Structure formats: C-alpha cells, structure tokens
Amino acid sequence: MNKPPAAPPGPLRPPPAEERRLAVAPAPAPARPPPQPPRLATPRQRLLLAAGVAFVLAGSLWLFSAILTPFVLAAVIAYFLDPVATRLAWIGVPRGAAALLLVLALALAALLCVLLLYPLLLAQVTVLLQRLPSYVVGIGQTVREALAALAERLGPEIVDQRLQDLAVGQVGAIVSFLGAALARLVGGGVALFNVFTIVTVTPVVAFYLLRDWPRMVVRMDAWLPRRSAATLRQLARETDRVLSAWLRGQLLCCALLAVYYATALSAVGLELGVTVGLVSGILTFIPYVGSTVGLIASVLLALAQFGTWSGVLTVLGVYVAGQIVEGYIIYPRLLGERVELHAVWVIFALFAGGVAFGFLGVLLAVPLAATLGVVSRFWLRRYLESPLYLDPPRTGR
C-alpha cells in the first residue's frame, strides 16, 4: 500500500514558553545619533568680545565721567575696607552690620578732620594772604644779598646787576604763585567735591558695595569665559596683590608723613607749617612730587619768615629726616617688596589720568596702571616662552 506524500517541512516553531517570551520582548531601541562635538568660539568671536567689552568700558567712562566720581570713590573705599569687613564677618559679625559700622566710622573720622583742620587751614591761608607781600620782599632781599656775596667772589662780569634783578623778580613771582595756588587749594578744596555727593551718595554707595562685595566677586567670576577663566583669575589675583599693597600701604604712608611734617614744621616755628606739612604728606602718593613741593614751599617760607640761613637749614633737616624715615622705616615695613609699580609709571599714570578726566582720572590711574602692569608682565612671560623668542638664530646667509 502506497503512503501519501509527506507535507513539505514548515518553519520551525519555538516551544510555547519561548514563543510567549518573544511575543512580549521590547523592540530594539533606535540607534542614537553620534554626539556632536561642542561648539568652539572662533578667534574672530573672541576678538570681537574683547573689543566690545573694551569699547563699552571706554565709552561709559567718557560718557558718564561727570557723574562717576562719587561711585569710583565709593568703590575705592569699599575695596580698602573689604579686608576689615571680612575679618569682622569671620568672627561672627553679620556682613551688613560690619559694612555699616565701617562706613559710619570712616564718615565720622572724615567729618572730625574737616571740623578740626579746615578752620585752622583757612586761618593759615588768611595769614598767608596778609603777609604775602612782606614774604616776597623778604625773600627778594635775602636772594639779593646772596647774589651780591656771589658777585664779590666771582666778579661782577659773571653775576651782574641785571642777573641779580632777574633772579629776585623770578623768586618773587614764584612765591606769589605758590601762595595764591595754596590759597585756592585750601579755600576751594570743597569745590573739588560736591558737598551733597560726599555727604550722601558716596557713603551710601560705599555701604552697598562693601556689603555685597563677596557676592559681586562670585558673580563676576561666573561670567568669565570658561576657556580663559583660570588665566583671568590668576591675573585678577596678581592685580589685587599689587594694587592692595600699593593702595593700603601708600595711604598709611601719606597719613603718617602728613602728621610728621605738620608737627615738625610747626615745632620749628614755621607759621604755615601745618598747611605745608599736610599738603606734603597728602601729595606723597605721587612719588617724589609731594616731598619736593613741600620742601620748596617750606624753604621759601623759611627765607621769608626767618630771613636767615639757619632757619632754612632747620627746615631742610626736617625734610631730610622725613625722607630717611620714609625710605628706611615706613616704606619697607608697610609696602616692602610686594609693590611692583615703578615710580615713573605711577607718576605718568596719575598725571595722564588727571589731564584726561580730572579727579576721576586720578582715582582710576593707579588701578589701571596696576592692571596694565600685570597684563604686560603676563604677555612678556608668554612671549619669552614662545617660538617668537626661542627660535634659534639663522646660521646661513
């Protein structure tokens, strides 16, 4: 008996349990696209960002220079008082309370100085204006006697009468100019600052800046471009080190020298010793200028008042002692080797800032000079490490 033909083999089926497992298995996930590389800023974008920031800062300084003085002065005060506020906060005093106490103490100290010193300075300026003609005559007579003695030694053909008259006239003009300038400086000193601004705006702005100083630093740090954040932080720390050392040390030096010169010149009997001494100490923040101006003014006043060279030598001794104390005691102990601002650079920055923006420029001069100095040294180090400097010299023709 023939068997029917076998059915063609069908597809193999898994066991029932395996079939159920395959039925509920999830579908394979679609392939993810490859991660895209992070977008990088082009050199042109970086250059435009730096140029834009510089343009905005310079434009704001030029456009708002008439009203920026109290705000810059408040920023200087907050920067100066920030270490003290930080220490008070570290021992448990709230930052806001510490800022308020420090600003109030500074305002009271400034008010006390104005109440005590300004009437005295005005009285001395009044004496100067009253006695200025006699001072001019006295100095002229002393100079004429010195030139006559010089003519006897060298002969009238070298030191003739016309030279003597010219020298006496020039000395008298210099004394008159210095006296008038000093009178305008003291008498119109309040005009340099708006009274309303100093009394109200500057302390209020200084309080808020001092209270929020740490948060502002953190916020500005968060705005730094990530690519250059480490370098910018290093430059900022270096600038802060140089600037804080110069600013705080220089202010203490000015205060100590002002007290010394005012006390010493008054002790030797110079009638305008307090005024000249305070001006000499305050101008000490301009290297060599304050002591030179004070020395010239004191010598001329000593010639006019005493009429003898012994009084002049006494005043010279006061300034020589002040320079010794300044150079060997005050500066090494308060500033030391931390300050990397050359005296010529500071003088140029102060005069350039004063010519460009007046008192505002003087306030901004040293911070900008310190920043430019730090950046210049940074790029100089980069240059000395680069192939531009390290490429070997050519050996062939």
Image: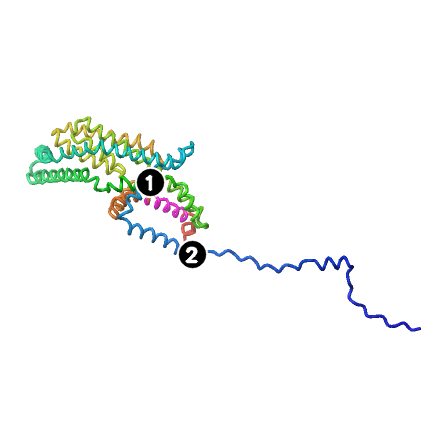
Residue 158 visible in this rendered orientation of the protein:
no
User: Viewed as shown, does residue 204 lie left or right of 8?
Assistant: left
Q: Which residues are magenta?
A: 368-383
Mark on residue 206? 1
Q: What kind of secondary structure does the magenta stretch mostly adopt?
A: helix
Q: Is residue 209 above or below residue 115?
A: below
Q: Residue at x 37, y 44 (%)?
A: 374
Disc 1 + disc 2, Cβ < 8 Å: no
Give the x, y percent position of residue 239. 37, 42
Which quarter of the figure has residue 234? top left
Q: Residue at x 59, y 59 (%)?
A: 32
Give the x, y percent position of residue 118. 20, 34
Which quarter of the figure has residue 172? top left
The residue singled out by tag 2 in the image is 43
Q: Residues within 10 Å of mark 1 (few under 14, many from 20)?
A: many
Q: Nearer the viewer, residue 383 or 344?
A: 344
Q: Is residue 19 above or below residue 153?
A: below
Q: Amino acid at mark 2?
A: Pro
Q: Amino acid at mark 1?
A: Ala
